[in-house]
Amino acid sequence: MTAPVRHHYDVGDDFYRLWLDSSLTYSCAMWEPVPGENLDVGGDALATAQERKLRFHLDVVGADRARAVLDVGCGWGSVLARLAVRHGVPRSVGLTLSERQAAHVRAQAYPGVEVRLENWLDYTPQDRFDGIISIGAFEHFATPADPPAE
Ligand SMILES: C[S@@+](CC[C@H](N)C(=O)[O-])C[C@H]1O[C@@H](n2cnc3c(N)ncnc32)[C@H](O)[C@@H]1O
């Protein structure tokens, strides 16, 4: 599982900067429909639609009141950044299999943020989390060998 993920994400942050928004969020955005048009994609800029999506998830976990939040598959840390900087969450943990992503998040030195180069299957938290966020990572977790029930 680790090798394909690294092959994909460790090609270099510059490549992803070419086509992601500045937060390097790498999952589907939430677009506002254009009134009167039967389209899913609205007239937003990508960054606006990503910010809407991030706010949605942060609201769901009650980030304003949370003391600790886990982000499974944290990417380049757009959720972790908002937890730390906007919501002042004292402790956030991000899991990723990508060395480049982990290095990027560590370099930001967000207060209270720990990024771990660790498979979520192997991660044993020491303390409780008030909320868990995972955006765009579950598609990595399944394999063709998994029984449908799993
Ligand atoms: C498509 S990216 C989404 C990143 C981020 N959530 C976002 O929305 O920008 C998937 C993320 O899942 C991570 N990932 C994939 N499999 C994982 C696993 N088994 N354990 C932990 N992280 C994993 C990858 O390293 C990557 O950070």
Image (cartoon, rainbow, N blue to C red):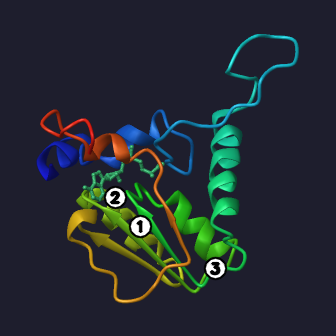
| Mark 2 in CB contact with mark 1 (< 8 angstroms) | yes
Amino acid on which disc 2 is placed: Gln
What residue is disc 3 on? 66
Looking at the rendered structure, the kind of residue marked 3 is Ala
- Give the answer, above or below, for where 78 lies relative to 81: above
The x and y percentages for residue 87 are 69, 74
Determine the residue positioned at 64% across, 46% down: 53
- Could you say which disc has been placed on residue 101 in the image? 2
User: Is residue 43 shown above or below 1?
Assistant: above
The mark found on residue 105 in the picture is: 1
Q: Which residue is drawn at 60% across and 71% down?
A: 83
When asked about the image quadrant of residue 150, the answer is top left
Q: Residue at x 72, y 75 (%)?
A: 64
User: Is residue 28 in view?
Assistant: yes
Say whether residue 15 is left or right of residue 78: left
Q: Distance between the residues labelled 3 and 2?
A: 24 Å
Disc 3 + disc 1, Cβ < 8 Å: no
* Helix, strand or loop at mark 1: helix
Q: Earlier in the sequence, mark 3 or mark 2?
A: 3
Q: Is residue 119 visible?
A: no
Foreground disc of the pair 3, 2: 3
Q: Which residue lies furthest to the right in this view?
A: 36
- SS at badge 3: loop
The structure residue drawn at horizontal position 27% and vertical position 47%, both measured from the top left corner, is 141
The one nearer the camera, 30 or 103, is 30
Q: Nearer the viewer, residue 47 or 123?
A: 123
Q: What residue type is labelled 1?
A: Val
Where residue 82 appears, x then y in whole percent?
Answer: 62, 66
> Under 8 Å from ligand 1: the CB of mark 1?
no
